[in-house]
Image: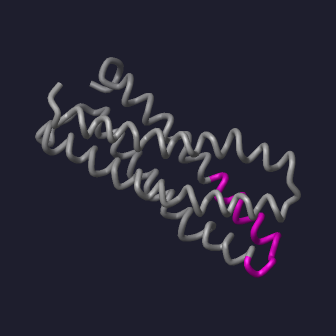
Amino acid sequence: MNLSFALPLALHQIASVVWIGGMFFAHFALRPTLQAVLEPEPRLRVALGVFQRFFPWVWGAIALLWLSGLWVFLVVMGGKADTHVHAMMGLALIMTLVFTLIVFLPFRRLERALAAGELPTAAASFAWIRGLMGFNLLLGLATVVIAAAGPSLWFR
């Protein structure tokens, strides 16, 4: 494996860990803990603060994933890849679109609702974020499986 493949692959994996790991942590550790120990308003305020800190990292991870993935696909592989690579790119596109939806609709709505003290609207926005993030987490985990097993299983 040469450096023109190893370096973008390593960066790709780091970005994947940041995004998918962050979603896993938020969904299975942070949210249940917040729900168990905080009332709705402080819970929503903590969630908003977490998202405000996490989402810029996700934007960076998305940029790094696309740049490193396209580098390997176009430069290293010459634009030719097995089906599993195309499947990963398709899932990545869906995940990117879902994240963009999260940021520009329910997240913005959550920010505005909390600033205005509209807790029912904030709670509904948070629920929407949670559902979309759970969907993206499933897609991300499927992408990891395809990346690891695709070349040796059914994706040839």
Q: Quarter of the image containing the N terminus? A: top left
Q: Position of residue 74 (x, y in %)?
A: 16, 45
Q: Quarter of the image containing the C terminus? A: top left
Q: How many dots with numbers?
A: 0
| Residue 45, picture quadrant | bottom right
Q: Residue at x 27, y 51 (%)?
A: 67
Q: Is residue 123 magenta?
A: yes
Q: Residue at x 30, y 23 (%)?
A: 151
From the viewer's perspective, tell me whether residue 37 is left or right of residue 13: right
- Range of residues picked out in magenta: 115-131
**In the figure, 132 relative to 49: above or below?**
above
Q: Residue at x 32, y 41 (%)?
A: 11
From the viewer's perspective, tell me whether residue 107 is left or right of residue 99: right
| Residue 125, picture quadrant | bottom right
Q: Residue at x 29, y 40 (%)?
A: 86
Between 117 and 96, the one lying in front of the other is 117
Q: Position of residue 98 (x, y in %)?
A: 50, 57
**In the figure, 87 relative to 132: above or below?**
above
Q: Position of residue 129 (x, y in %)?
A: 64, 58
